[in-house]
Image (spheres, rainbow, N blue to C red):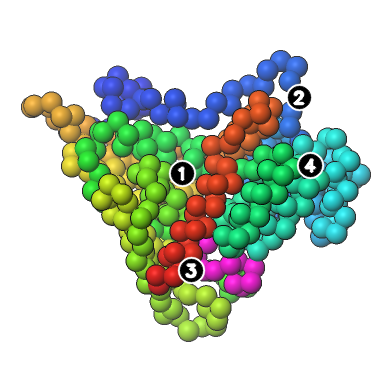
Amino acid sequence: MGLSRREFSRLGAMGLAARMLPSVGVAAQGERKIGYAVIGLGLIGDHFMRGVQSSPNSKITGLVSGHRDKAERIAAQYGVPKSSIYSYEDMDKFRDNKTIDAVYVALPNSMHAEYTIRSAKAGKHVLCEKPMSTTVKEAEDMIAACKAANVKLMIAYGLHYEPLNLKAVKLIRDGALGKVQTINGAFGFNANPTAWRLNKALAGGGSLFDVGIYVLNASRYLTGEEPVKFTAVTSTIDQDGRFKTMEENISWTTKFPSGIVATGSSTYGTQMPGYFKVFGSKGWLEMGPAFNYDGLKLRASFSSGEKGSPNIEIDDANPERDPMHFTREADHFSECVLRNQTPRSPGEEGLRDMKYIEQIYASA
């Protein structure tokens, strides 16, 4: 039986996921919007800027780019004055720009640490894309710099704010699946040979840094536990020149304190739609797509636990287009700045994943 959100909430097994959603709401009357300078005007930066257009408490007030002509075109689109366009070299001058409260770091992985630290020293709050960095040391330096400057640091784990992922977490926490036994997940795609992500100096590593981190992080928020052991293997099948500095495929197994075992895989060698499946003593749930910016789908089947009761089935979708993913991130971070609250995905969350990524590679 397919259930709508309203129908299923009446069964009492779900419907409470909204309580886990970050409070965003509408900005209080007269409350100012948080101004963001976007550092890096590539595809991910474009997604963020379009998302901010729908935010009640955020706006784009600055741009940092190595291409002045491109920056001016985008500035005109978002109403950013030319005086608020900076190059990477003179970016530190935005310290004196009072319209910029925070930055969104949308650069290749190897540049996250430098531009987070520079932004913090300029007194700006930082929303940084994942992976947080390329090493544990960089992540620790980023956290330390933001604390020293008394600015907030949030890592852009968008799925921590996405309704269906939160619904999956809620079902597990409420015991709908019984005792979770195992989790399987994967994500990957066929990488373009000219992409910067195939350059280890820029990316930090292979697909684990890019798309595997979604699978790794999902196993943590689904279980609510931190891993205690990893085993892993890597392989490179296609000898086409793309994988001179990194592996093509990686798979790992994670053991959690409760005994839950999770397996994960990521690849740059083939299209692998992102998904996860959770198996418990009373039933199962799966999301696929699970990690995209739109078109997410949750399915589940489990027993209510009452004698003679039929299984409960869920077939729920979130068709929202990609800007909403970034709108939620901006909403939450802006509210944290306005209310002086700690983000739900702070720098420490990114640091934990960096430590686990190092352990996975060490095992492999």
Q: Is residue 239 visible?
A: yes
Q: CA distance from mark 1 to mark 2?
A: 33 Å
The secondary structure type at the circle numbered 1 is loop
> Image quadrant of residue 114?
bottom right
Q: Residue at x 17, y 33 (%)?
A: 303
Place of residue 194 in the rendered image (x, y in percent of width and height, measured from the top left): 63, 73
Asked if disc 3 and disc 1 are in contact, CB closer than 8 Å, the reply is: no
Left or right? Give the position of 139 relative to 116: left
The tag earlier along the polypeptide, 4 or 1, is: 4
Q: Is 208 displayed left or right of 228 in the figure?
A: right
The quarter in which the N terminus is drawn is top left
Q: How many marks?
A: 4
Residue ranking furthest to the top: 29
Q: Amino acid at mark 2?
A: Arg
- For disc 4, the neighbor class at 10 Å (few under 14, some 14 to 19, many from 20) is many
| Mark carried by residue 32 | 2
Which quarter of the figure is the C terminus placed in?
bottom left
Three-letter residue code for mark 1: Gly
Which of these two is toward me, 345 or 307? Answer: 345
Kindly check if marks 1 and 2 are in contact, taking CB atoms under 8 A apart as contact: no
- Disc marking residue 268: 3
The residue wearing badge 4 is 123
Q: CA distance from mark 3 to mark 1?
A: 22 Å
Nearer to us: label 4 or label 1: 4
Q: Which mark is residue 295?
A: 1
- Left or right: residue 136 compared with residue 144: left
